[in-house]
Image: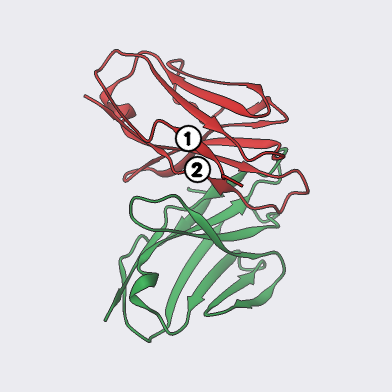
Amino acid sequence: DAGVIQSPRHEVTEMGQEVTLRCKPISGHNSLFWYRQTMMRGLELLIYFNNNVPIDDSGMPEDRFSAKMPNASFSTLKIQPSEPRDSAVYFCASSPPQGRNEKLFFGSGTQLSVL
Amino acid sequence: QKEVEQNSGPLSVPEGAIASLNCTYSDRGSQSFFWYRQYSGKSPELIMSIYSNGDKEDGRFTAQLNKASQYVSLLIRDSQPSDSATYLCAVNDLKAAGNKLTFGGGTRVLVKP
């Protein structure tokens, strides 16, 4: 199993540009999570999906952020327009459907730098 | 008040000693507790899970859970330089569908040879 696959690994962009982060969860997993990690705020949950349906997006900072999961094998997190304060590592994670105690499997993350 | 609290550290321990990490949580109904290890520049990886009061041992790691006091701890015995990392405590959110976890800020551990 290839694990959770995220792309790109690194993204450098200028303020005001649109940024799209991509995630492919582990096959068979039915929950997908987008986290953001910074030194100041730690690991924050932005949004998560269960069976492709957004369940909780209360962690999305503002309307500039949006996420989609068109099918069980793909999700995107979009920032439009991007700002320097969006610079962080963005992790995607997935978990299997067996129960409430299943562990999260994290992707390698996308290091985003907004100049 | 944050839902999951950890001392940020760094916790400096000599090689071979025991590292003791603590975590407190605010939701008394939480049922599942996890410890993740994160090396610098890498993603978090699960090292321990615990669901019942008491101790759970796995190799050099021991997780301890006390639901009455709302804390969970992690002991690392015979600490090695390779244990130097940030350790994240995570607690499940019973109000949410699916396996939603809330993470603490992490404790940075430095094991000195």
Report the number of discs: 2
In this picture, residue B89 sits left or right of residue A26: left
- Residue A73 sits above or below residue B102 on the image: above
Q: Which residue is drawn at 61% across and 41% down?
A: A94
Q: Quadrant of residue B96?
A: top right
Structural crowding at the residue carrying mark 1, measured as other residues with C-alpha within 10 Å and reported as few (<14), some (14–19) or many (≥20)? many
Measuring from the top left, give residue B54's x and y in whole percent: 67, 76
Q: Say which residue appears at 38% left-offset and 58% top-offset.
A: B39
Identify the residue at horizontal 55%, vertical 54% (top origin).
B90
Residue at the right extreme of this rendering: A98
Residue A34 seen in the current view: yes
Q: Is mark 1 on a helix, strand or loop?
A: strand
A89 vs B65, left or right, is: left
Amino acid carrying label 2: it is: Gly
- Judging from the image, mark 2 belongs to the subunit labelled A
Mark number, residue B70? none
Disc number placed over residue A107 in the picture, else none: 2
In the image, taking residue B98 as reference, residue A26 lies left or right, namely left
Residue visible at 36% across and 60% down? B8
The residue furthest front is A1
**B76, A61: nearer the viewer:** B76
Specify whether A76 is left or right of A69: left
Residue that badge 1 annotates: A6
What is the three-letter code of the residue carrying label 1? Gln
Which hue is chain B drawn in? green
Residue B26 visible, this angle? no
Q: Earlier in the sequence, mark 1 or mark 2?
A: 1
Q: Colour of chain A?
A: red
Q: Are marks 1 and 2 in contact (CB under 8 Å)?
A: yes
